[in-house]
Amino acid sequence: MGHGSSGRRPAPPASPAPPAGPAPAASGGGLLRRAGRVWREIVKFGAVGGAGLLVNLLVFNLVRHVTDLPVVRASVVATVVSIVFNYIGFRYFTYRDRDKSGRTKELTLFLLFSVVGLVIENGVLYLATYGFGWDTPLQSNVFKFLGIGIATLFRFWSYRTWVFRALPVAEESGAPGGGRASAADREAAEAESYLRAQPKPPEAKKQRSKAYR
């Protein structure tokens, strides 16, 4: 009886489960960081776009007063000038941290989407001028402004999606401040190392004792 009882050992207490709290916090923090990046992008885009709007309207009115070009042609000239201004502002201010590897492709796509925006912007002015006869200086500026606003929505979507592409996550993590993007991965690795450091379950000890017998 003594020999039978000596082979049994009290089972060690069950190891506590690793804390599962940080995962939701990391997820919420990631959403907040993403929303913050989008908000900063919108502010920078608006700053460059606002300056481009002033350039567009100033050139538009200057061309109308200095030359005899029809209103829509004067608007096209102003739009082309603002496109050049906007590219410099977007490339070197709003999206200066985006991928710069394919500059030829970037310029091609920028010009393509800018032409579409030009058609949208001046199409509104053309419709108001020749479709409804609203061609006073005030009306021309109002519909020029309206066309710019509609075209800006298209430009914001197309530029950030196709022209100024975001860097991959792996490259962002190497940039200053990019290490925060991998916080969830670090927490997962810490949880895994915590589990490996825990004592083995009692079954493994029982099997080892039977092998010695």
Image: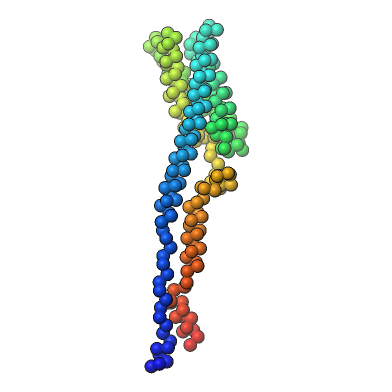
Identity of the residue drawn at 42% across and 60% down = 19
Asked where in the image residue 153 lies, by quadrant, the reply is: top left
Residue 7 place in picture, x, y as percent: 43, 87
Given residues 82 and 55, the one toward you in this image is 55
Identity of the residue drawn at 44% across and 40% down = 35
Residue 108 shows up from this direction: no
Q: Quadrant of the N terminus?
A: bottom left
Residue 95 place in picture, x, y as percent: 55, 34
Residue 50 shows up from this direction: yes
Compared across the picture, whether 54 is left or right of 100 comes to: left
Reply above or below: 138 against 109. Answer: above
Reply above or below: 131 against 12. Answer: above
Compared across the picture, whether 133 is left or right of 99 comes to: left
Compared across the picture, whether 4 is left or right of 158 comes to: left
Q: How is the image coloured?
A: rainbow
Q: Residue furthest bottom?
A: 1
Asked where in the image residue 90 lies, by quadrant, the reply is: top right
Residue 46 place in picture, x, y as percent: 48, 28
Residue 126 place in picture, x, y as percent: 44, 15
Identity of the residue drawn at 41% across and 58% down = 20
Identity of the residue drawn at 40% across and 74% down = 13
Given residues 206 and 131, the one toward you in this image is 206
